[in-house]
Image (tube, rainbow, N blue to C red):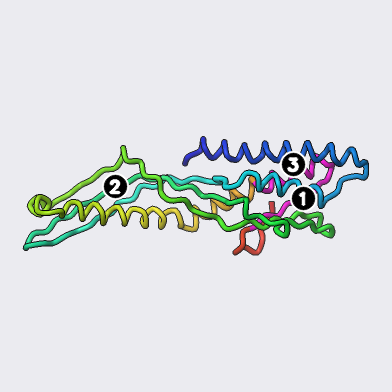
Amino acid sequence: MAAGGLMRALLALVVGLVVGAAALWFVIEDRDTGPDIETIAAASLEAVRAQNRLTVFAGRFTVAVTSRAERLGFSAEKTMIVPATVRYEIDYAKLRAEDVRWDAATNTMQVDLPPLEISEAEIDLTQVREYGEGSVLMTLGNAEDVLDAANRQKVSAAVRAEAGVPLMLDLARKSARDAVARGFRIPLEAAGISARVNVRFPDEAGSGS
């Protein structure tokens, strides 16, 4: 896991929201009208959107792909073992005002996130290992280049398949929900409001935080 970069990204989100909460608190105090939930929600939304695209989780995978070629009665096969990292991201700029709602009856802030996105694989070229057989065909024409090109195409698909397994998606979504819930809860608590923050993705019925 790319823990260092992930922690810095989450820290930036929380710090941004804390600053927004502090500024908002002075506005509320100056008005001397008590906490205004809609104002708090709007300020929190803008603080989150200011983060733009944020990495909420990262995964490192090692995949093995093999391609085979046959020509003139000869055959060749080449295997690549590739370590790669993918980032799970949320484009917070896509959050809309209607995605943040306050339910006074249940004292709950509802936040609907945009879809989780998976980045292109970042391949660690220094750690790639290759194994081949069929040296005769390898020396004829561009057989090795063809095999390399075929393997490179397979790597991207293999990494995305690994990154898209339910376990990894669940971990990434939980990380995103926890960070966003914490961020929206900070300004509420700063205003003296004890509230529940419920964060969910478009395909989820709801997830309490």
Q: Residue at x 73, y 36 (%)?
A: 19
Q: Give the left or right position of residue 32, taking residue 91 as reference.
A: right
The percent position of residue 142, horizontal first and vertical second, equals 15, 53
In reply to whether residue 173 is colored magenta, the answer given is no
Determine which residue is flagged by label 3: 186
- Gap between marks 2 and 1, in whole Å? 48 Å
Contact (Cβ within 8 Å) of mark 3 with mark 1: no
> Helix, strand, or loop for circle 2?
strand
- Gap between marks 3 and 1, in whole Å? 11 Å
Q: Residue at x 61, y 62 (%)?
A: 202
Q: Mark 3 or mark 1: which comes first in sequence?
A: 1
Q: What span is in magenta? A: 180-200
The percent position of residue 100, horizontal first and vertical second, equals 73, 56
Amino acid found under the numbered disc labelled 1: Ala
Determine which residue is flagged by label 1: 41
The percent position of residue 203, horizontal first and vertical second, equals 60, 64
Amino acid found under the numbered disc labelled 2: Ile
- Gap between marks 3 and 2, in whole Å? 45 Å
